[in-house]
Structures are given as structure tokens and as C-alpha cells.
Image (spheres, helix red, strand yellow):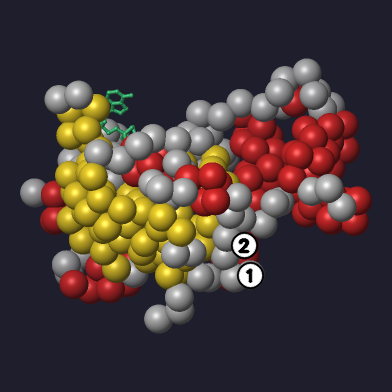
Amino acid sequence: MPQAVLEVRGLTKAYGQIEALKGIDFEVAEGEVFALIGPNGAGKTTALRVVATILRASAGSVSVEGIDALKEPDRVREIISYLPEEAGTYKSMTGETYLKFVANLFYADPEKRSAALERGRVIAGLDERLGDKSGSYSKGMARKLLLARTIMTEPRLAILDEPTSGLDVLNALEVRDIVKRYAKGGAAVLLSSHNMLEIEYVSDRVALIHEGRIVDTGSPAELKLKHGADTLEDVFAAVAS
Ligand SMILES: Nc1ncnc2c1ncn2[C@@H]1O[C@H](COP(=O)(O)OP(=O)(O)OP(=O)(O)O)[C@@H](O)[C@H]1O
Ligand SMILES: [Mg+2]
């Protein structure tokens, strides 16, 4: 087993009376795409936001590259990147200016800046539309710009909440390829989706999350075999009932 980049242990999160996470455990290794999958309200976004150091856990631990995310969130923020479920771009900036802005924010060295900017351009794949104001982009175009922003800085852990939401088939395919390739380059990717069919293509391992608990974890093939199911949707139906 390659080294774990992310380790989550006994993670609990309550919003007042609502227990959104009831003690979840998982780890994501270097080179791995790991997906939390489950229906609306299962706790996916809550888990991702805690890992991204945006929300405080009620109990449990999160560590990234051995750094305790609850005790040293600032150090963890330097090595992670988070794409929220509903993120916006700066609408009056062009895509190009936005990527430049991010590159300048992250790197002082001019060579590193231009290398990051070039990675961003390639990932966004918007070609000449990169020169247009991002407020004029379609939902899918804006999503790709945001994905570019998230991984152009080469985080050790990329946290992507529903990365393909709002994308058509071709764009979703492209985004899945980008995500896979990024992980294979030696980083870790944690993503969420309620689309269990598409997740098979992108994830090395998945955790099925239901009402704040992980009900099973494994590779899509392992899980289908174990539950005698043809699809992850069937696996989910089997474990959720
Ligand atoms: N800010 C909040 N205040 C109160 N309850 C919340 C808050 N955010 C989430 N919840 C509750 O926590 C539970 C988990 O929500 P969460 O957003 O993590 O689910 P999800 O799996 O991401 O769902 P979706 O697929 O719809 O994005 C739900 O019961 C939700 O109502
Ligand atoms: Mg969500």
C-alpha cells in the first residue's frame, strides 16, 4: 500500500441536533482517486469541508501528510486545494486573468508562475475563450476553469466536491481524465459524487456513505463482486437497505 496522504479517523460532525457525520474512517493514498459516494444529504460535502479545514469537526481526526488538520490547519492549507460544490469565478475577470491571479497568489518565482499558468491553461482547455470574461462562460466552462484553478498549484491533496456537476458527457469524460492523470502524477484526490455510474471510471476506491456512516469501502470491482451486483448503484441499494 502506498503511503497515505490523507487519514480520516472517527470523524463526527453535528450541526446542532443534526448529526451529519457519525464517525467515518478512510484514507487516501498517493496516486489514488478516492470517492465518497452516496445520496443527497449523506454527508459528503460535510466530510469534504472538514478535510478542507473550512468546517471544524465535532470529534475525530484528520491528517494530511502526517499534519493534524484540526491542530495546524494553516500548514495543511498549504498542501491542499478545494473545489466547492457551488463555486463561482470572478465574473468580470477573463479566464486568463483569473488563472494569472491564482498563479501570482501562489508563486513568487516568475518561472514557477508561468509554469503554473500554463498548467492552468491546459487543464481549463478553453482555448481562445480564455480571453473572455468568465461571467460569459457556460456552467461547464466555468467548472473547468475552477478545476484548473484547483489543481494548477499541484496540491498534495485535491478535494473536489462533485467535480463534474453540470457538465455534459464529453466534458465530464475530459474532467475525469484530468483528475485521474493528476492523481497518477503522485498526488491524492478526494472527490464526492452522487452519480454512482460515472464514479466507477474515475475512482480507484470508493466509500459508500449513507446517513453519515460509511457502509462499505473498496474498489468498484471488489464491491460489485462482494455484493453480487452489476453496478455500484445495485451495491448501494444492497448496503443501504
Ligand atoms: N450548514 C448546515 N446547517 C445545518 N445542517 C446542515 C448544514 N450543512 C449540511 N447540513 C445537513 O447535514 C447533512 C449532510 O449534508 P451534506 O451537505 O454534507 O450532504 P451531501 O452528501 O453533500 O448531499 P448532496 O448530495 O445533496 O450534496 C444533511 O442532513 C444536511 O441537511
Ligand atoms: Mg454535497
Residue at figure coordinates x 90%, y 56% from the top left: 111
Graded by Cα atoms within 10 Å as few (under 14), some (14 to 19) or many (20 or more), the crowding at tag 1 reads few
* In the rendered image, the vertical position of residue 241 relative to residue 54, given as above or below: below
Q: Can residue 153 be seen in this snapshot?
A: yes
41 with respect to 131 (left or right):
left
To which residue does mark 1 refer?
185
User: Residue 50 at what x, y percent from top left?
Assistant: 38, 42
Furthest residue in direction right, as rendered:
110
239 with respect to 85 (left or right):
left
Task: Indicate the quadrant of ligand 1 in the picture.
Answer: top left
* In the rendered image, the vertical position of residue 134 relative to residue 121, given as above or below: above
Please give the label number shown on residue 77.
none
**Displayed quadrant of residue 156:** bottom right
Q: Nearer the viewer, residue 25 or 71?
A: 71
32 with respect to 79 (left or right):
left
Say what amino acid the circle numbered 2 marks.
Answer: Tyr
User: Residue 148 at what x, y percent from top left?
Assistant: 69, 45
* In the rendered image, the vertical position of residue 57 relative to residue 201, given as above or below: above
**Displayed quadrant of residue 41:** top left
**Mark 2 and mark 1: span between their CA atoms?**
5 Å
User: Residue 183 at what x, y percent from top left?
Assistant: 57, 65
Say what amino acid the circle numbered 1 marks.
Answer: Gly
To which residue does mark 2 refer?
182
Q: Nearer the viewer, residue 172 or 34?
A: 34
Furthest residue in direction left, as rendered:
241
Residue at figure coordinates x 18%, y 56% from the top left: 215
Q: Nearer the viewer, residue 7 or 35?
A: 7
Question: Given contact means CB atoms under 8 Å apart, are the residues at marks 2 and 1 in contact?
Answer: yes
Residue at figure coordinates x 71%, y 51% from the top left: 152
Q: Can residue 195 be seen in this snapshot?
A: no
Find out if the beta carbon at label 1 lies less than 8 Å from the nearest ligand 2 atom. Answer: no
